[in-house]
Amino acid sequence: MASQQIEIYNTLTRKKEKFTPLHPPFVGMYVCGPTVYDDVHLGNCRTFISFDLIYRYLVHVGYKVRYVRNITDAGHLEGDRDEGGDKFAKKAKLEQVEPMEIVQKYTLGFRDVMRMFNTLPPSIEPTATGHISEQIEMTKEIIAAGLAYESNGTVYFNVEKYSQKNNYGTLSNRKLEELLEGTRELGGQDEKKGRLDFALWIKAKPEHIMRWPSPWGIGFPGWHIECSAMSTKYLGKTFDIHGGGMDLIATHHTNEVAQSQACNHCEPVKYWMHTNMLTVNGVRMSKSAGNGFLPMELFTGSHKLLEKGYSPMAVKFFMLQTHYRSTLDFSNEALQASEKGFDRLMNAIRTLEKLKVSDKSSSDIKALHQKCYDAMNDDFNSPILLANLFDGVKTINSIHDRKELISKEDLSLLKKTFRDLVFDVLGLKEEKISSNNDELGNNLMALIIDIRNEAKAKKDFPTSDKLRDGLAKIKISIKDTKEGTTWEIEK
RNA sequence: GGUCGGAUGGCCGAGCGGUUAGGCAGAGCUCUGCAAAAGCUCCUACAGCGGUUCAAAUCCGCUUCCGACCUCCA
C-alpha cells in the first residue's frame, strides 16, 4: 500500500482531489506519446519528463504502476478535420523512404533522447499500427451502439447524437453550442453529417501507402481511436490516470472520452492530468510555429538562439524547477541559472557522503524529510521539493564546515531523503566524473596534484597555477579543500 | 469573436488569507598564496484602481497588458 496521500489536479473537475486508485495497490496510467514522423522537440520532452516524475513518485511511494505510453505511427493527417495528407507518407516521400522507415528512425531517436534525459521506459509502449484490429473492433462497437456511421468508406463519430445522452465538452468545459460556433459550415458534398463529427476510420486514397482492410474497405484508423483502443486493452474500460499535453484537451482527449464512453458505456478515466506548454519568448514552442528546439541542438549548443550547450540533466533540472501545470519560458539566462543550481545540488550530495556524525543534530532533519514529501504529495510540486532540498544543501554544507551537527540516525535519514528524491523520484543523475576506473588517468592526476602541491609548498605559485590553468583548459577542475586537493572532469 | 489561464524582486520561478519560498545574478565579509568551493550578511517584489477582512501577492469587482485553445501539434 502507498505510504503517502497524494493529491492530484484533475482536469475533469478543475480542482485538486485526493488520489485513490480504482484497484490499489495497482495504478493504471496512460500518457499520449509522440507522433513519430519527425524529431521530438523540447516541448514534447517536457511532457514526458513531467509524467516520468509522476510515474517515479507513484512507484516510489509503493504503487504498482502500469505505465502505458503509445507511439503514434499511423493515422495522423496534417490537415484539419480528417483531411489532408498523411504525415508519415509526406515525410517518407520527402526523405525517399518507406513510411515505416520514418517511424523506425524517429521512434529510435525519441527513445535515445528520453534515455539521455534519464526517464524510465514505460511498462508498455504500444503502437497504433500494431493495434489495427483492436481499433476496427472498437469502431464496430461504436457503430453498433448507434453512435457512428459509415459514409463512402469512412466512419464518423456522431457527436450530436452522442451529446443527447452524454456531455461531450466536459474536459474542455464547453457546451456543444459553443463548440459548434467555432466550426465552419459543411459543404454540400461533405461526407459528415455533423460539423463536429470526427473520423474513426478513414478510407485510403489510391496513393496512400499505409493501409489495412476493414469492414468498410481499405483504409486506416483515425487519430483519436488508437488511444481509446490501446488504453482499454491494457488498462481496462476505466483506469486511474490519463495524461498528455494541455493542447490535447480540446480535441484529442475530448474525442477519446466520447469514443470510449460510446464503446464501453462508462467513464474511461478517473483522473485527467495535463502538462502545460514550453514557451520561447512567451510563445508556445510548436512544430507549426517553427520555434522548436531539438534536444540535440540544446545539448550541443548548435541552435542559433543559444550561447552554449546545456547538459541533459541541467535541462531536466530547469524543467523540474517549474510546476508541470505552469508554462515554462525558455531563455539562456534561465538555463544558465539551472545549470549552476544543478551543480550545487550535486556537489552537496557528494559532500553528504563525507559528513561526520555527532551525538546530536542541530537541525530538524525529520521535518525537512516531511516537507519534501508534502511537496510531492501536493500535485507533484517539484519546485517546492527542490526548494526544500536546497535548504538541505545549506544544512549539508554547514555540517561539513563544522557549523552544524548531525546525529548518526539523522545522517542516514538525510542521505536516504536525498538519494530517494534526487535520484529515484526526480530522476537526476551525476554527470561529472571525479574518479573512475581509468587507472592511468587516476595515477596521472595523482602525480600532477602531487607536483602542484610541492610547488605550492615551495611557494612556486607560477608553477602551481600553470598546472591548474592547464588542466582547466582540458576541462579538469582543481579544488584545494581542507581535506586535500580534489579534481573532476567537466562534462 | 467564444472559452480558459496568466501578470510576482535584475532574471527564472513557488505561493491559494497572517510565516524568509528556492535557484541564478549583484554587493560586502570569512576561509584561501591566489582561485574555486563553502558559510554568513545585504538587496526583499507581488500590473493598476477600488472593495471585503483584525489581516490580501493570496478573496471579490473593474481596468490595462500577455498567452493558450477553438485548425495538425506534448
Image (cartoon, coloured by chain):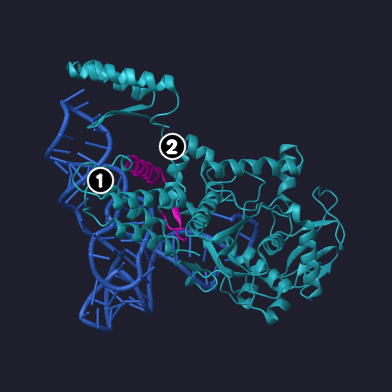
Chain colours: A cyan, B blue
Count of all numbered marks drawn on residues in the image: 2
Q: Which residues are magenta?
A: A322-350
| Whether residue A160 is situated above or below residue A330 in the rendered picture | below
* Mark 1 nearby-residue class (10 Å; few <14, some 14–19, many ≥20): some
Q: Taking A339 as reference, is A452 left or right?
A: left
**In magenta segment, residue A346:** yes
| Whether residue A324 is situated above or below residue A344 in the rendered picture | below
Question: What residue is shown at x 54% (from left), y 49% (from top)?
Answer: A45
> x, y percentage for residue A435?
39, 29
| Whether residue A140 is situated above or below residue B39 in the rendered picture | below
For marks 2 and 1, give the CA distance.
28 Å
* Mark 2 nearby-residue class (10 Å; few <14, some 14–19, many ≥20): some
Circle 1: element type? loop
Q: Amino acid at mark 1?
A: Val
Chain identity of mark 2: A
Task: Residue under label 2, please give it.
Answer: A431
Looking at the rendering, in which quadrant would you find the C terminus of chain A?
top left
Chain identity of mark 1: A
> x, y percentage for residue A467?
30, 19
> x, y percentage for residue B58?
33, 72
Question: What residue is shown at x 46% (from left), y 57% (from top)?
Answer: A327
Main SS, magenta region, reads helix
Q: Nearer the viewer, residue A334 or B19?
A: B19
Task: Residue under label 1, please give it.
Answer: A357
Q: Nearer the viewer, mark 2 or mark 1?
A: 1
Q: Amino acid at mark 2?
A: Glu
> x, y percentage for residue B32?
17, 29
**In magenta segment, residue A320:** no
Question: What residue is shown at x 25% (from left), y 50% (from top)?
Answer: A407
